[in-house]
Image (spheres, rainbow, N blue to C red):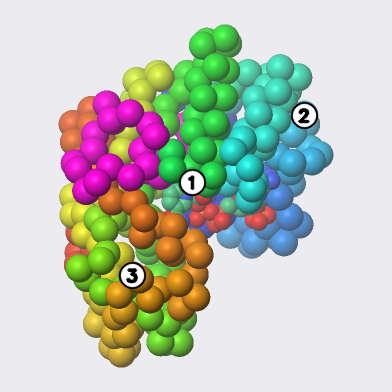
Amino acid sequence: MVGDIIIVGCGYVGTRLARQYLGLGQSVLGVVRTQAGVERLAAAGIAARRADLAGEGLDALPLDGALVFHLAPPPDQGREDSRTRRLVEAFTRAGQPQRLVYISTTGVYGDCGGAWVDESWPARPGVDRSYRRWDAEETLRRWSDASGGELAILRVAGIYGPGRLPLERIRQGVPMVRAEDSPFSNRIHVDDLVAACMLAMERGQSGAVYNACDDSPSSMTDYFLAIADAAGLPRPPLIPLAQAQGQVSAAMLSYLTESRRLSNRKLREELGLILRYPSLADGLPSCL
Ligand SMILES: NC(=O)c1ccc[n+]([C@@H]2O[C@H](COP(=O)([O-])OP(=O)(O)OC[C@H]3O[C@@H](n4cnc5c(N)ncnc54)[C@H](OP(=O)(O)O)[C@@H]3O)[C@@H](O)[C@H]2O)c1
């Protein structure tokens, strides 16, 4: 591949992605919002630049002809992703990337009533968080159409990995809803997501969307019980959904209003991803 790698939003996933490219001898620049982020990346041997998608610093980034991963989250409120809009505006001043891979979420599909969902399923966001992601996708599609810059979008399921398990919540004994009230949900191990990001950059069809998840949809309840068992912690108490208000976080409650089983066939067949961790049972030992 030609062009330098720039990872905008170089946090948990981005740092692992940067390490993979550095290992291949590629030049990588990690972009973060805070000075603490810059120092964290420097300590990991990753060249870092501070720029805020909601503030200053974007115009100075070496974006012209670059291979850009956009992993920075949208703002916390509203239905628009003003940060992605500002990033695209900056391209007109700092230079157009050759290709951009965006990490969206599977939330853009909304509630699918437990159906199997591939990338042809219509996007019907159900909550503001998902509208913001849809807005980011649409902003980037408009950029790609207008500039000719290549774009691949990964719609990513719940990310887990080392240091990214809800162990503290389980230790505190916070309840989870009982299995019969728990809708289908989907996950991906961070190492498989990093591999998917690299393949999307290398060979994703421009304009294409790929679901990024493992082979094994389950439920949020299964997820918490499996982690508790694997970590040797007491299982969380299980309560009916009707009693969960006030006992379970608002964010968790909103996740529990949507049910989908995601197909990863396109990710495997078109991008050629061979999952290292096809299920949570395969992936959990690497996290503990
Ligand atoms: N958690 C999930 O299950 C899940 C599922 C699907 C998609 N995603 C999305 O996947 C992406 C990567 O996740 P992650 O776990 O790696 O996230 P993370 O660890 O929270 O890292 C986010 C990075 O973005 C940077 N950032 C935040 N606001 C920014 C801004 N205004 N301008 C520039 N940089 C900014 C942060 O900088 P600092 O280091 O300076 O704070 C940080 O480096 C995120 O967009 C996340 O929402 C997550």
Q: Is residue 69 above or below residue 141?
A: below
Amino acid identity at mark 1 = Val
Q: Earlier in the sequence, mark 2 or mark 3?
A: 2
- Contact, CB < 8 Å: mark 1 with mark 2? no
Q: Is residue 37 above or below residue 271?
A: below
* Mark 2 → mark 3, Cα distance in angstroms: 48 Å
Instruction: Tell me what residue is drawn at x 33 percent, y 83 percent.
Output: 236
Closer to the chain start, of discs 1 and 2, is 2
Secondary structure of the residue carrying numbered label 3: helix
Q: Amino acid at mark 2?
A: Asp
Q: Nearer the viewer, residue 24 or 213?
A: 213
Badge 2 is on which residue? 59
Which residue corresponds to mark 3?
Answer: 241
Q: Of the residues shown, which amino acid type is indicated by label 3?
A: Leu
Task: Please provide the residue range marked out in magenta.
Answer: 101-124
Which sits in the foreground, 278 or 47? 278
Where residue 243 appears, x then y in whole percent? Answer: 38, 76
